[in-house]
Amino acid sequence: MTGRLEGEIALVTGAAGGLGSAVVRRYLAEGAKVVAADLRPGPLKELAEALGSPAELVTVAGDASDWETSKEMVEAAHRAFGQISVYTSCVGVYDHNVQFSEIAGDQLGAALLECWRINVGSVLVNLRAVLDDLAATRGRAVLTGSYAAHAPGGGGVLYTSSKHALLGVVKQLAHELAPKVRVNAVSPGVLPTVMTGLGTLGQGAKDAVLPGTEQALPLRQIPTGDELAGLYVTLASASDTAAVTGTVLVADSGLLTRGLGSPSGGDEL
Ligand SMILES: NC(=O)c1ccc[n+]([C@@H]2O[C@H](COP(=O)([O-])OP(=O)(O)OC[C@H]3O[C@@H](n4cnc5c(N)ncnc54)[C@H](O)[C@@H]3O)[C@@H](O)[C@H]2O)c1
């Protein structure tokens, strides 16, 4: 049986992260050739080594929100494989739920710029660099939203506003880039990863999952990246979602359905 991404050339950013590395593994398993890009060269190298450094994988280390790096990613794909047909972003920084009142006024501008530059800006500059390829291949962009793209309380105002903006990118570019390019996203709820905080606020990397989260989820289950990777394959596939653009697959363990009483609607069955 052939893989669902046989013949596809994918650029995956945030590829060394918890979710991104799972997507890279799954794309390769489904037959794609992959350019894996991340800011952190060490974990990127470890990912390639753990996969046995296959010929179908090349890595690019650099800041995805930078235009020159974006062009390098595309050039790396051209040198190794050919034109990119799938762009997937798993890049993200978190604000670790910092409350608005806790951010000093003179830090706010820089913190907002950092959060939005990485969570939203990287997607725009990458997509601009890869646009000709995607148009030529009738390509697909699969972005990463969040529960925080849909509702409050999944982060602080910096992260929540950046993820809401990402939905604006999905909708506007799905509109502008049709009929040649489809643009969709996956919105995870909670993932067991260690997320980088905002350097401008002096935040380090911390667990994304808070104690007690599992019990607050209607499905009482925190998925791994591997359990979400199939959703990316579905949206990246040329045939399985041929009529789908401008949409978001919400994979939040039911958080958006949570009620006032118990996490699920009534008594547990
Ligand atoms: N972990 C969660 O609970 C959760 C929930 C909802 C949504 N998300 C989203 O899922 C995505 C993946 O997050 P994760 O949980 O795997 O976190 P992660 O920190 O493991 O992965 C994010 C990756 O992005 C990379 N990155 C950060 N800034 C970059 C830059 N400027 N250029 C290139 N790479 C950069 C990091 O090095 C890291 O490898 C993010 O968009 C995040 O917002 C995560």
Image (cartoon, rainbow, N blue to C red):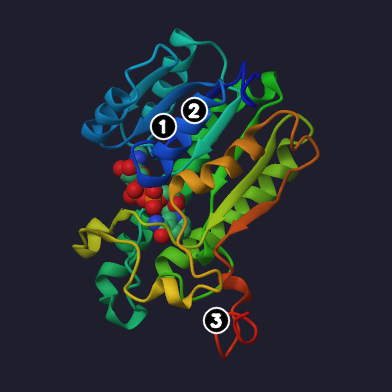
Secondary structure beneath label 1? helix
Q: Earlier in the sequence, mark 3 or mark 1?
A: 1
Q: Residue 56 carries which label?
A: none
Quadrant location, the N terminus? top right
- Find residue 102 and report its image quarter: bottom left
Secondary structure beneath label 2? strand
For image coordinates 57% across by 15% down, the residue present is: 83
Disc 1 vs disc 2: which is toward the camera?
Answer: 2
Q: Which of marks 1 and 2 is nearer the N terminus?
A: 2
Disc 3 vs disc 2: which is toward the camera?
Answer: 3
Q: What residue type is labelled 1?
A: Trp
Vertical position of residue 15 compared to residue 247: above or below: above
Residues under labels 3 and 2: Cα distance?
Answer: 37 Å
Q: Mark 2 points at which residue?
A: 11
- Find residue 61 and report its image quarter: top left
For image coordinates 38% across by 18% down, the residue present is: 58
Q: Is mark 3 within 8 Å of ligand 1?
A: no
Vertical position of residue 78 compared to residue 255: above or below: above
Residues marked 3 and 2 touching at CB (< 8 Å)? no
Q: Nearer the viewer, residue 50 or 19?
A: 50
Q: Residue 263 carries which label?
A: 3
Q: Can residue 133 be seen in this view?
A: yes
Vertical position of residue 201 compared to residue 70: above or below: below
Image coordinates for residue 208, horizontal then vertical, percent: 34, 62
Q: Mark 1 points at which residue?
A: 67
